[in-house]
Image (tube, rainbow, N blue to C red):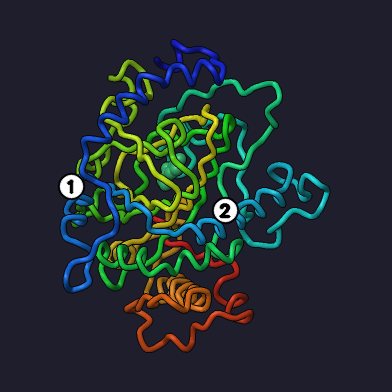
């Protein structure tokens, strides 16, 4: 059903309208060979079958990468952030009247939206990369005026978030896809509250390199999503496999040709259990629907690039176009990875720490402590490398 056909729909009507689409999407997802546990080859590299599946489909679901204890720590830190959130955008106190958390960071960690809304669809926000709007069901009478949609800066707001950033398996995957000298992008934690969470309209993430003479299907990097709760077809991220190879897609026409419906026929849901980690190519067509289900989704989303995609590129999305990402700028943002590796190693002495090639020999300069937090971790996200 299109937005026009549905007019103003209730959350219950929206949920009902998803039923057959969800069923068909799950069947399509089951046909794709793009999931399984992390596997390495004999020389310790990411198994070539996994890389091949990622390159073909543009997405992969790594099952069970983050263990239960770490998921519990991440959930507890998210709970703290939600408990201490301001009461709405621009508010300075939380629901108990305490000073809201995180208001001293340069970038406010909280982004609020109206329940079940699509904040970016059909707007010029974020380079206009979400050209169509998803259906915005009417929330129940008891819904709050605003809900948290995104938490930013997980490496400074959550001790467990910084440690996750240094996860050796995740960094090994980043190196396998983007090269040993890979560089960071940004992070954003999507919070889709049951019956309240908003949508993220169909889009491709990359905005800068579509006309680059060296364009290829990996030039805009990828995002991980670490899933803290079960992701169902009604609350999860949907992707259209293979679209990372197509160049810039005319999303408006695609939706128009689908009778105006946001329920794209080739899309699949990225179904996950807690602890699963998805990898999604930033050129893939992807989006998520208003969460009219009863299930919470929290997805810690952070990405990595090839160094060649970033070096000498200009700022985009959250960064100013007047910025140029030179060697120094890349180095400054990449320091966070080395600090995260150390913070993680202190908490997980049993693990083999990841060796991040650009910082080999510099490890002692990046030991995690209070001073290092102030110099490197605090406000690291001002230096994100968005393209
Ligand atoms: O998780 C979601 O709902 C949206 C994620 C997304 O659009 C992104 O990572 O670019």
Task: Give coordinates of residue 108: x percent, y percent.
Answer: 64, 54
Residue pushed farthest right? Answer: 97
Q: Nearer the viewer, residue 49 or 311?
A: 49
User: Rounded to the nearest whole Å, what is the CA distance between mark 2 and mark 1?
Assistant: 33 Å
Report whether 340 appears left or right of 34: right
Q: Quadrant of residue 155?
A: bottom right
Name which of mark 2 and mark 1 comes first in the sequence. 1
Q: Is mark 1 within 8 Å of ligand 1?
A: no
Whether residue 381 appears in this view of the structure is no
Report whether 49 appears left or right of 159: left
Task: Give coordinates of residue 346: x percent, y percent.
Answer: 52, 78
Residue bearing the label numbered 2: 75
Q: Secondary structure at mark 2?
A: helix
The residue shown at (45%, 63%) is 323
| Mark 2: few/some/many CA within 10 Å (<14, 14-19, 20+) | some
The residue shown at (48%, 74%) is 348
Ligand 1 image position (quadrant): top left
Task: Give coordinates of residue 222: x percent, y percent.
Answer: 33, 54
The residue shown at (49%, 45%) is 229
Say which mark, if any, is on residue 56: 1
Q: Secondary structure at mark 1?
A: helix
Q: Nearer the viewer, residue 205 or 289?
A: 289
Task: Give coordinates of residue 320: x percent, y percent.
Answer: 48, 57
The answer to whether the residue labelled 2 contacts the one labelled 1, judged by CB atoms less than 8 Å apart, is: no
Q: Of tags 2 and 1, which is closer to the observer?
A: 2
- Total labels: the figure holds 2
Up-down relation of residue 83 to residue 369 (above or below): above
Say which mark, if any, is on residue 328: none
């Amino acid at each position: 059903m299109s937005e026009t056909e549905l007019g103003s729909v209730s959350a219950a009507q929206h949920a009902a309208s998803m039923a057959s689409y969800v069923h068909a999407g799950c069947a399509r997802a089951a046909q794709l060979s793009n999931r399984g546990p992390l596997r390495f080859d004999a020389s310790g590299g990411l198994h070539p079958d996994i890389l091949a599946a990622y390159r073909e489909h543009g997405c992969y679901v790594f099952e069970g990468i983050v263990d239960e204890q770490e998921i519990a720590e991440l959930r507890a830190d998210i709970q703290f952030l939600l408990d201490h959130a301001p009461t709405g955008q621009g508010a300075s106190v939380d629901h108990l009247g305490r000073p809201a958390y995180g208001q001293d960071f340069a970038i406010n960690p909280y982004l609020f939206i109206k329940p079940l809304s699509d904040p970016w669809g059909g707007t010029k926000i974020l380079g206009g990369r979400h050209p169509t709007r998803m259906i915005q069901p009417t929330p129940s009478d008891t819904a709050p005026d605003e809900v948290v949609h995104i938490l930013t800066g997980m490496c400074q707001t959550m001790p467990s978030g910084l440690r996750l950033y240094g996860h050796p398996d995740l960094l090994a995957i980043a190196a396998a896809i983007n090269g040993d000298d890979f560089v960071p992008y940004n992070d954003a934690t999507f919070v889709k509250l049951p019956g309240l969470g908003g949508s993220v309209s169909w889009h491709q993430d990359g905005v800068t390199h579509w006309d680059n003479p060296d364009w290829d299907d990996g030039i805009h990097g990828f995002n991980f999503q670490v899933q803290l709760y079960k992701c169902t077809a009604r609350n999860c991220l949907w992707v259209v496999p293979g679209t990372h190879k197509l160049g810039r897609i005319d999303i408006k026409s695609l939706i128009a040709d689908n009778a105006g419906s946001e329920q794209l026929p080739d899309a699949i849901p990225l179904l996950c259990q807690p602890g699963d980690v998805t990898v999604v190519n930033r050129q893939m067509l992807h989006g998520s629907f208003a969460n009219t289900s009863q299930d919470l989704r929290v997805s810690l989303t952070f990405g990595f690039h090839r160094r060649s995609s970033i070096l000498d590129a200009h700022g985009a999305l959250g960064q100013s176009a007047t910025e140029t990402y030179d060697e120094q700028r890349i180095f400054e943002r990449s320091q966070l990875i080395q600090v995260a590796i150390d913070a993680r190693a202190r908490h997980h002495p049993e693990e083999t720490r990841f060796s991040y090639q650009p910082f080999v020999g510099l490890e002692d300069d990046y030991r995690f402590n209070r001073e290092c937090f102030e110099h490197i971790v605090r406000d690291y996200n001002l230096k994100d490398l968005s393209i």
